[in-house]
Image (cartoon, helix red, strand yellow):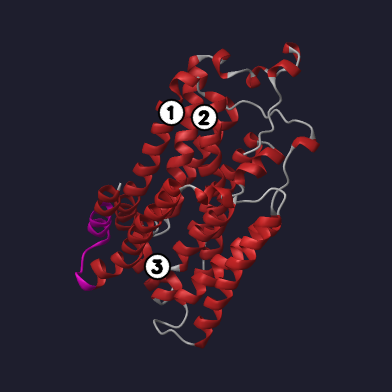
Amino acid sequence: MPTSAVPASAVPASAVPASAVPTSAMPAPAVRWALAGLSLSVLLSSLGTSIAHVGLPTLAEVFSASFQEVQWIVLAYLLALTTLIVGVGRLGDLVGRRRLLLGGISLFTGASVLCAAAPTLWLLIGARAAQGLGAAVMTALTMAFVGETVPKARTGRAMGLLGTMSSVGTALGPSLGGALIAGFGWRALFFVNVPMGLLALFLAHRHLPLDRRGPRAARARFDHLGTLLLALTLAAYALAMTLGHGRFGPLNAVLLVAAACGVGLFVRAEARAESPLVRRAMFRDPVLRASLATSALVATVMMATLVVGPFYLSRTLGLGEALVGVVLSVGPWSLR
């Protein structure tokens, strides 16, 4: 991934802002607070992935929606997250990582307010998509900021902390969501993100180093075509798998063919792109291919359990929201 940082030797010491000094010169308390803000950002993005699952049966009743419709509360978030996260690093190089991260946290927090206030299902789904865009920025850039804020001797520990926070958010989401629905109603599922988002925004704004941008000619371009094709392909596949109320009809087949064509167009576009989202040379590594396949299987099992599970537990077994959340939390912990 290209970087926009200017080498220290090329900038006079007097011209470097105090907040943009090397990590070794940053005070230890500032590093700790910066890492706290990054950890909270990771927690929020993973919590946003899992906290809404437990509320799907309740939301289906509130909005008089079918399972095929209400599952888009989860799918919209995941589609937006998956589409943007691949290119966030390069986008950060173009506009500035700190600026982009602050924008991502702000978008996630504002979208959480819209989710909590949504009067209709489709407005809620749209707000969830915006929330997913913010989560993509938060997920990708927090890892990139570790190298800029944490001394090299503590980088491994910091990366482990961020990974742990991601796991905690995924596992905590169902149980926390069940308790919130039981105690305060479904809107609390999304409103709980607001105070944590504001705190993450304050910490990031206060303690992350300022952006140091290099010459425009040295920055790679953002792959707009690849991002668009990826979004359309994922959307077509998701629609093919959800339309039809459980029956696979002609429209589903057309959408599935469109998704397959989208994959081909995406591969072709990436081969010709100056700065592709995904470099095909990466997939020549057998270890990487095996790792990606394993991750895909784990994610498929976990997401299927978290989407279908709440309906079975609540409508078939008759469990309450809080107990449903506790049961669903077992899955993410065991898979991780």
Classify residue 101 as left or right of residue 305.
right
Residue at (25% x, 49% y) in the render: 334
Q: Which residue type carries mark 1?
A: Ala
Q: Which numbered dot is residue 59?
A: 3
User: In 3D space, how far apart are the residues under numbered discs 3 and 2 (Cα atoms)?
Assistant: 38 Å
Residue at (42% x, 68% y) in the render: 71
Rendered-image quadrant of the N terminus: top right
Q: Tag 3, which secondary structure?
A: helix
297 versus 156 height, above or below: below
Identity of the residue furthest to the bottom in this view: 250
Q: Residue 153 in the image: x percent, y percent?
A: 45, 19
Q: Earlier in the sequence, mark 3 or mark 2?
A: 3
Q: Which residue is mark 1?
A: 158
Q: Tag 2, which secondary structure?
A: helix
Q: Residue 191 in the image: x percent, y percent?
A: 45, 51
48 versus 160 height, above or below: below
Q: Which numbered dot is residue 146?
A: 2
User: In 3D space, how far apart are the residues under numbered discs 3 and 1 (Cα atoms)?
Assistant: 37 Å
Q: Tag 1, which secondary structure?
A: helix
Q: Is residue 129 magenta?
A: no
Write down the region rendered in magenta: 316-329
Q: Earlier in the sequence, mark 2 or mark 1?
A: 2
Q: Which residue type carries mark 2?
A: Val
At label 2, counting other C-alpha atoms closer than 10 Å, the crowd grade (few under 14, some 14-19, many 20 or more) is: many
* Residue 14 occupies quadrant: top right
Q: Is residue 324 magenta?
A: yes
